[in-house]
Image (spheres, rainbow, N blue to C red):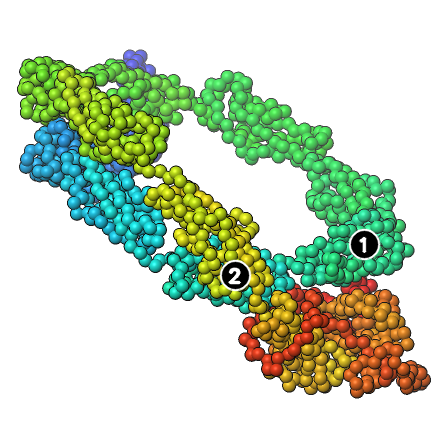
């Protein structure tokens, strides 16, 4: 249009110039012609994108001498503006790809064109069209199980873009496939993958296919197609039954129509082609047509009566067939149960059985061979006569013993009555049980018992007597019972011995409570037939006080501070007494003697007075510990330690102040604290708690900074500094003030991101920036905010105080989509500091156009059988908004829950859930299109979907049909009418009725359309009482559907059957004297009729035998009861006629005969023939002898008259008699079961009890007295059997080595004893005193050890010899092993304190040798002084016989003498016992040849004072060789003392001698030894004791300290007992405390 205007103007100018003759330019070219300078005049080409907008400059013309240009080509797409070619219209590459423009250049307005230019414009395509599919929606059918790479669909895709921009280049399945893909794209084709589609898993796929182009310019565009794939089902699944098959059980009398079992097969096929519909048929096993199967439900029912006798089981073959013809077969096992109609048969069971009397409780004596021809019948068994409870019968018919049999009782035959029933029928058997005799009884012991024996009980003493009884008859030809020991616990086999015939258990070796507290002796009794019994006795060892208290340790060092208050417990003594005796504690010695310490009754040491280190730093007390007989001593040494008297004191009153800048560096000095201590002790400093920022020098008190400070976190530190002098502590407080330093504020984030909606009003909050300033005080911590840059057009403002950014001027998304503000934050300090951050603000576009549907309403229809995924219709909407922020992208949805769904992208509406026209035949759905804008807009469409009907409802029978009809009802009687309902319409719901099964003999019929059920033949309840009619109702639709129901028709009864008695027990038994109305038995009758016709009444019609009225019967239950007192002696048998009558019309009845036997009861007591019995016997009568016979009788019958005898054990006399005596349980013979002992018991009293056989029994008693006369029967016994003694190699003082002791339980002559060496040791160098048992050496000894045997004999008749005692004698050298104490005491004075003296010496030696013992050897008196000569053995291992092989370790004199240093730890012995000297062995002058010891009053001759001779020599040698003589004097002083006529006192008894008194012979009896000693039986093995009670059994010397220790070899624990050169106790006390 513009070009035409321009040409018009040119023409107008030209005309005017011609008319008026005006010349505007030089046409002659004097001033030049136009020339195009660029491009050359030959022409040019210019490229141009087809999307160039109007006004776009295509080309700029340049020509010289040109006034204007004219575009000669008439294209609406282009125009000329001055010298520029511009776009004036829309370009389209697909329409015109090239333009050629002719342009002229004019020198002046009216002049003709001087030059022209052809400009070729090449249009460049741009990507302006997305690929499109044709059609956009494709529907295809795909058969399930289609193989790999099968073509499903080929898509047609086009792209409106032309030129080199390829379209539809990339095909993809965007969605709609499974997670395991079933489809794939091959170029533009959809193909199947290797994973096959399965209709049963998914029937419809909605695939969204995308195709993208690949432009040279611009972004790719994508097109979308929807491919709806409908899966066509195949019959690819066959019906399947469970693998296990089916089974059922029926009784043979069930009526036809009875449901049996329902079979079910599953077919996984789905779809409308009925592939998954299964029908059932019976294909085999139903040859007699007894069963029917519903073809649809699979319910198998009976259609004819069953007969167990004809056929007891069925194996049906059932086939399931689906709609495609595939099938499966299963088996149904049906077992037919029998009805009980046969009585039990016991004809093969024996009637007489022999039983040995040895058969015991529970023994099976007979198995009844009963059977029942009825299959599965269970027989029950009962003994109505069980032999008085002797027999019972179990559920299997096994008759077992409930009581032991005994032929000797006289009960040798039992008559049993067995009743066998199968629940309906009863059979009675009479069985005779004959008892045959057997010698069956083994010995029997009473219950195991426990006894107590003191540990010091003499050996060869009676401990217990084992007694067994034998219930077999005792005759003279039977040997008595014999006894033996089987085992003894705790290795006690050598402790006890049992007499073979009497059962006496005798102690043969000593007991020791501390070794073992009990023994279990298991013994055996055997009879003549070698039948045995075993029992046991538990022997508890009673503790005797034979152990001294033992304290560990016996030397205790203590350290106690002087400020310990009185009554404070400072130590608890660790003392123990193995006997468990109560210990008593006393202070025996207190140094100094000021009662500062005391001991309580519990053994604790307490402070009794205030302590003072300065006055008394050390105490020593000796505490005595006693159990009343034995004692021990503990030495306690207590060091008193000083107490610190003052704590350190800080300067400055303990308050310090300091100030630090918060920028102070680690290690900076803070301040120094100082303190002084009045005790001048070294002071150390520390913090009371751990401070992370400070440390203190423990010696100087300097405090340094150890971590960063921050005033804003902690402005003030309070430090607690402790000063300690080692025991006392003081506290100072240090305040450290932290001074503030200005720190720069910091933005919390370097960059903030905010969004705001375009057009938001002024003051709308956009966001907030925040900063933190570490400073918390003054202007240093105040910050202000400002926008430095980026606030284009001043759209935003910021609050200077809180950093809130708000709208200052509304934004416009089209002007700007984002802003980057630079915000500064600055504090208000004198020298301010600042920080910067960025706030990125994005402008959000506004969504203001909703999607629009066209049209706004839509109608469609679908059949109700449409499967899930079926496409119904498609909806479509458009949105006028742009695609910015998704404003024009929307998705489809529905606003309500319906069986349909809409695809959110394609808008395709599909079936989502099963449809049912009968439930809902029309749906009105609102479809929504919601865009994705920030404020979503919504468009709506109303979709109406109509549901079309199919025949899919099975007719259903309404209600339950259970009715009753009389068996006399006439034919054509209407029983009931069936009703049904069908949800379908028209012909699909019209019903048709038929009887499928259960109509036996065609007794009923049904009208097919009305449903009336009528009687069609005569009915008989006795033949069949109930009918189960399976009725089928079908509709007339296609396909035809049906259902079934079972109607129960019960036939009511008329009275036409008399009652009958059930076969069962007709003979009953009842005890005499039972109370009135005791139940005797019961009769049962049945009537085949029912209701009133079957109601029965019982009565006693006649008393055939016995007094009338003796019994009555319950008229309804049939139970028979007593009606009078029964007396078997008067009337023992009754016979009754019982009748039963029903309540029908007319009445019908039956009769039965019943027999009742009255049984005897126990009502008489046994009676003895004498009121009491007396007998005298000697104590040596043989075991098994019958002493006396008691006898009783009982006038009752049967087992009530069977009498048994026993002893009354409820009294002490009875228990004592039971020890010796047994009684025959059936004859009453009193029999000796173990030897009598006159010394123990000279008379026995007992009560005999006679009991009858009842339970509980009736009993009578009588008294029996047995007097015992004495015989000599006890040998002497040593106690102990082992003696441990010592003797010098050379005897100088008539030393009694030891004294052996024996005892004899007999009296008078039998108890008089004398002692002899064993014949094997008669030539030994020892002798034993004939009467006293004292052992001495007859001459000098020359061996290191002797083991001697000693025996003892009594003076009885016959003379008895003891077991030998063993004496161990070890020899010592007097000059090497003896230590001599000289006491300023007379001999008599010493003897008074000898026990204490030996105890103190032993305790002193045990400080070094914990297991040592000490014994006195010689004692002699001279000039009022007594010399006591002792020897010591290092340990006590030789006290036990099993250590005979071990040498005895005598302590040497030079080992023991240093222990008694007058200034050492044992110095108190010197003062307590007036010891004046301790030296080695001092041999006395040779004694007279006469072995008798001279009396003290003998005249002394040649008395020499050895000190008078030794002193001058001693002082002379002392001046010459002081060092040598000091050493010699320390080791030994050689003195000669004594007098030829001096009397030497012998020890009264060996320390090892027993403390029990030795029995002495009466003066009137002279003991005469036998010429030839009797040969003694070998001594029993002596029980061996443990090696030692002390676990520290190993000695050593520490190589570093030189200390001596003993060690526990098991635990490796060491006990330090002394140092080599210092006082042991002092060393132990001082070592822990230092010098």
In the picture, the quarter occupied by the N terminus is top left
Question: Is label 2 in a helix, a strand or a loop?
Answer: strand
Query: Can you tell which quarter of the image residue 584 is in?
Result: bottom right
Farthest residue toward the front? 1170
In the image: residue 797, left or right of residue 1127: right
- What label sits on residue 1177 in the rendered view? 2
In three-dimensional space, the C-alpha distance between marks 1 and 2, rounded to whole angstroms, equals 77 Å
Query: Can you tell which quarter of the image residue 189 is in?
Result: top left
Residue 1043 in sight here: no
Rendered residue at 19%/18% (across/down): 1143
- Residue 958: horizontal and vertical position, in percent? 18, 17
Rendered residue at 64%/68% (across/down): 1308
Residue 1326 in sight here: yes
In the image: residue 1016, left or right of residue 429: left
In the image: residue 1576, left or right of residue 26: right
Mark 1 in CB contact with mark 2 (< 8 angstroms): no
Question: Is label 1 in a helix, a strand or a loop?
Answer: strand
Rendered residue at 57%/79% (across/down): 1574
Query: Can you tell which quarter of the image residue 29 is in?
Result: top left
Q: Which residue is mark 1?
A: 560
């Amino acid at each position: 249009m513009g070009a035409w205007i321009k040409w018009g103007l040119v023409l107008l100018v030209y005309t005017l110039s011609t008319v008026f003759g005006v010349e505007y330019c030089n046409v002659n070219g004097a001033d030049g012609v136009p020339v195009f300078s660029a491009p050359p005049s030959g022409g040019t080409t210019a490229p141009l994108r087809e999307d160039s907008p109007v006004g776009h400059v295509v080309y700029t013309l340049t020509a010289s001498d040109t006034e204007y240009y004219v575009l000669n080509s008439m294209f609406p797409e282009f125009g000329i503006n001055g010298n520029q070619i511009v776009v004036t219209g829309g370009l389209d590459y697909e329409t015109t790809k090239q333009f050629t423009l002719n342009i002229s250049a004019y020198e002046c307005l009216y002049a003709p064109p001087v030059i022209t230019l052809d400009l070729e414009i090449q249009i460049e395509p741009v990507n302006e069209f997305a690929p499109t599919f044709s059609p956009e929606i494709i529907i295809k059918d795909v058969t399930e199980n289609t193989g790999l790479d099968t073509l499903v669909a080929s898509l047609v895709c086009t792209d409106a873009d032309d030129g080199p921009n390829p379209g539809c280049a990339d095909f993809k399945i965007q969605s709609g496939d499974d997670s395991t893909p079933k489809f794939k794209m091959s170029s533009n084709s959809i193909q199947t993958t290797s994973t096959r589609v399965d209709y049963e898993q998914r029937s419809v796929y909605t695939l969204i296919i995308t195709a993208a182009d690949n432009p040279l310019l611009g972004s790719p565009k994508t097109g979308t197609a929807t491919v709806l794939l409908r899966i066509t089902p195949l019959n690819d699944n066959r019906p399947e039954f469970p693998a296990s098959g089916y089974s059922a059980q029926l009784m043979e009398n069930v009526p036809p129509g009875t449901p049996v079992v329902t079979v079910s097969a599953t077919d996984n096929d789905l779809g409308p082609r009925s592939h998954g519909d299964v029908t059932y048929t019976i294909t085999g096993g139903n040859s007699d047509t007894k069963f029917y199967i519903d073809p649809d439900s699979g319910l198998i029912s009976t259609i004819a009566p069953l007969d167990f006798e004809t056929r007891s089981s069925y194996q049906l073959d059932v086939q399931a067939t689906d709609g495609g013809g595939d099938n499966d077969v299963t088996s149904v096992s049906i077992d037919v149960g029998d009805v009980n109609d046969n009585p039990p048969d016991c004809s093969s069971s024996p009637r007489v059985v022999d039983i040995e009397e040895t058969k015991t409780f529970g023994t099976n004596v007979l198995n009844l061979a009963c059977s029942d021809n009825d299959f599965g019948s269970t027989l029950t068994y009962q003994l109505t006569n069980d032999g008085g409870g002797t027999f019972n019968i179990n559920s299997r018919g096994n008759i077992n013993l409930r009581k032991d049999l005994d032929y000797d009782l006289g009960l040798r035959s039992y008559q049993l009555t067995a009743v066998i029933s199968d629940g309906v029928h009863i059979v009675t058997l009479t069985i005779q049980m004959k008892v045959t005799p057997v010698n069956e009884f083994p010995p029997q012991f009473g219950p195991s018992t426990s006894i107590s024996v003191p540990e010091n009980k003499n050996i060869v003493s009676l401990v217990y007597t084992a007694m067994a009884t034998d219930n077999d008859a005792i005759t003279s030809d039977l040997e008595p019972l014999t006894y033996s020991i089987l085992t003894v616990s705790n290795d006690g086999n050598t402790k006890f011995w049992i007499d073979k015939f009497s059962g006496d258990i005798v102690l043969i070796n000593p007991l020791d409570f501390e070794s073992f507290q009990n023994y279990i002796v298991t013994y055996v009794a055997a009879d003549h037939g070698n039948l045995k019994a075993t029992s046991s006795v538990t022997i508890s060892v009673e503790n005797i006080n034979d152990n001294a208290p033992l304290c560990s340790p016996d030397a205790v060092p203590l350290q106690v501070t002087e400020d310990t208050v009185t009554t404070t417990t400072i130590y608890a003594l660790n003392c123990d007494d193995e006997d468990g005796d109560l210990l008593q504690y006393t202070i025996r010695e207190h140094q100094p003697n000021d009662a500062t310490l005391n001991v309580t009754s519990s053994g604790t040491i307490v402070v009794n007075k205030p302590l003072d280190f300065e006055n008394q730093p050390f105490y020593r007390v000796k505490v005595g510990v006693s159990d009343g007989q034995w004692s021990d001593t503990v030495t306690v040494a207590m060091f008193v330690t000083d107490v610190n008297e003052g704590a350190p004191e800080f300067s400055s009153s303990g308050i310090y102040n300091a100030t630090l800048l918060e920028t102070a560096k680690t290690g900076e000095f803070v301040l120094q604290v100082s303190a002084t201590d009045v005790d001048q002790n070294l002071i150390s400093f520390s913090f009371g708690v751990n401070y992370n920022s400070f440390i203190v020098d423990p010696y100087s008190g300097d405090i340094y900074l150890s971590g960063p400070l921050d005033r804003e976190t902690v402005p003030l530190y309070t430090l607690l500094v402790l000063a300690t002098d080692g025991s006392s502590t003081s506290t100072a407080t240090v305040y450290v003030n932290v001074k503030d330093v200005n720190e720069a504020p910091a933005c919390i984030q370097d960059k903030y991101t905010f969004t705001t909606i375009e057009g938001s009003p002024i003051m709308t909050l956009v966001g907030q920036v925040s900063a933190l300033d570490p400073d918390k005080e003054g202007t240093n911590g105040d910050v202000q905010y400002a926008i430095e840059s980026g606030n284009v057009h001043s759209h935003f403002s910021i609050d200077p105080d809180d950093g809130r950014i708000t709208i200052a001027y509304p934004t416009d998304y089209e002007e700007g989509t984002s802003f980057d503000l630079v915000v500064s934050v600055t504090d208000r300090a004198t020298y301010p500091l600042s920080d910067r951050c960025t706030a990125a603000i994005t402008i959000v576009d506004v969504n203001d156009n909703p999607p629009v549907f066209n049209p706004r309403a839509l109608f469609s229809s679908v059949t109700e059988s449409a499967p899930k995924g079926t496409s119904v219709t498609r909806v479509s909407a458009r949105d006028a908004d742009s695609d910015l922020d998704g404003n024009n992208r929307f998705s489809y949805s529905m606003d309500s829950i319906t069986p349909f769904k809409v695809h959110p992208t394609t808008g395709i509406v599909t079936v989502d859930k099963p449809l049912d026209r009968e439930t809902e035949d029309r749906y009105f759905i609102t479809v929504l299109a919601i865009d994705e804008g920030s404020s979503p807009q919504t468009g709506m469409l109303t979709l109406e979907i109509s549901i079309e009907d199919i025949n899919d409802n099975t007719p259903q029978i309404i209600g339950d049909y259970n009715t009753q009809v009389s068996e006399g009802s006439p034919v054509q009687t209407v029983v009931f009418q069936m009703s049904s309902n069908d949800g379908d319409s028209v012909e699909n719901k019209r019903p048709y009725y038929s009887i499928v099964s259960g109509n036996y003999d065609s007794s009923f019929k049904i009208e097919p359309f009305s449903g009336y059920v009528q009687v069609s033949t005569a009915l008989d309840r006795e033949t069949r009482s109930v009918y189960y009619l399976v009725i089928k109702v079908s509709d007339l639709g296609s396909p035809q559907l049906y259902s079934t129901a079972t109607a129960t028709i019960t036939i009511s009864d008329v009275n036409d059957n008399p009652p009958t008695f059930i076969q069962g027990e007709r003979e009953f038994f009842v005890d005499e004297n039972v109370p009135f109305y005791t139940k005797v038995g019961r009769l049962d009758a049945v009537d085949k009729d029912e209701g009133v016709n079957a109601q029965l009444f019982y009565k006693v019609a006649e008393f055939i035998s016995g007094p009338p009225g003796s019994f009555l019967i319950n008229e309804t239950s049939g139970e028979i009861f007593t009606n009078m007192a029964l007396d078997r002696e008067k009337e023992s048998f009754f016979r009754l006629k019982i009748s039963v009558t029903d309540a029908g019309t007319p009445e019908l009845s039956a009769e039965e005969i019943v027999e009742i036997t009255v049984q005897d009861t126990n009502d008489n007591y046994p009676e003895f023939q004498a009121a009491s019995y007396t007998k005298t016997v000697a104590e040596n009568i043989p075991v098994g002898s019958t002493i006396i016979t008691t006898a009783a009788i009982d006038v009752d019958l049967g087992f009530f008259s069977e009498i048994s005898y026993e002893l009354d054990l409820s009294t002490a006399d009875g228990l004592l008699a039971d020890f010796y005596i047994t009684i025959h349980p059936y004859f009453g013979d009193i029999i000796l079961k173990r030897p009598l002992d006159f010394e123990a018991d000279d008379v026995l009293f007992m009560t005999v009890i006679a009991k009858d056989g009842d339970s509980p029994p009736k009993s009578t008693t009588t008294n029996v007295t047995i007097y015992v006369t004495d015989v000599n029967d006890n040998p002497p016994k040593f106690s102990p059997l082992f003696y441990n003694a010592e003797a010098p190699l050379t005897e100088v003082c008539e030393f009694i080595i030891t004294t052996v002791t024996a005892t004899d339980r007999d009296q008078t002559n039998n108890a008089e004893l004398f002692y002899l060496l064993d014949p094997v040791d008669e030539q030994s160098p020892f002798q034993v005193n004939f009467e006293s048992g004292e052992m001495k050496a007859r001459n000098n000894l020359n061996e290191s050890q002797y083991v001697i045997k000693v025996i003892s004999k009594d003076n009885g008749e016959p003379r008895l010899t003891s077991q030998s005692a063993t004496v161990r004698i070890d020899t010592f050298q007097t000059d090497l092993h003896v230590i001599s104490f000289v006491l300023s005491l007379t001999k008599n004075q010493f003897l008074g304190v000898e026990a204490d003296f030996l105890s103190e010496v032993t305790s002193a030696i045990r400080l070094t040798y914990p297991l040592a013992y000490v014994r006195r050897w010689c004692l002699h008196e001279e000039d009022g002084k007594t010399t006591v000569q002792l020897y010591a053995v290092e340990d006590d291992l030789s006290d036990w016989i099993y250590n005979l092989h071990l040498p005895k370790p005598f302590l040497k004199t030079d080992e023991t003498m240093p222990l008694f240093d007058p200034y050492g730890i044992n110095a108190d012995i010197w003062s307590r016992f007036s010891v004046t000297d301790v030296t080695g062995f001092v041999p006395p002058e040779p004694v007279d040849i006469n072995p008798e010891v001279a009396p003290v009053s003998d005249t002394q001759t040649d008395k020499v004072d050895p000190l008078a001779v030794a002193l001058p020599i001693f002082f002379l040698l002392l001046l010459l060789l002081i060092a040598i003589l000091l050493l010699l004097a320390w080791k030994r002083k050689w003195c000669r003392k004594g007098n030829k006529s001096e009397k030497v006192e012998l020890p009264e008894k060996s320390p090892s001698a027993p403390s029990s008194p030795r029995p002495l012979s009466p003066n009137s009896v002279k003991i005469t030894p036998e010429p030839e000693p009797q040969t003694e039986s070998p001594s029993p093995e002596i029980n061996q004791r443990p090696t030692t009670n002390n676990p520290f059994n190993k000695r050593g010397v520490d190589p570093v300290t030189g200390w001596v220790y003993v060690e526990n070899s098991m635990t490796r624990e060491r006990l330090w007992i002394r140092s080599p050169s210092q006082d042991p106790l002092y060393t132990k006390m001082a070592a822990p405390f230092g010098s």
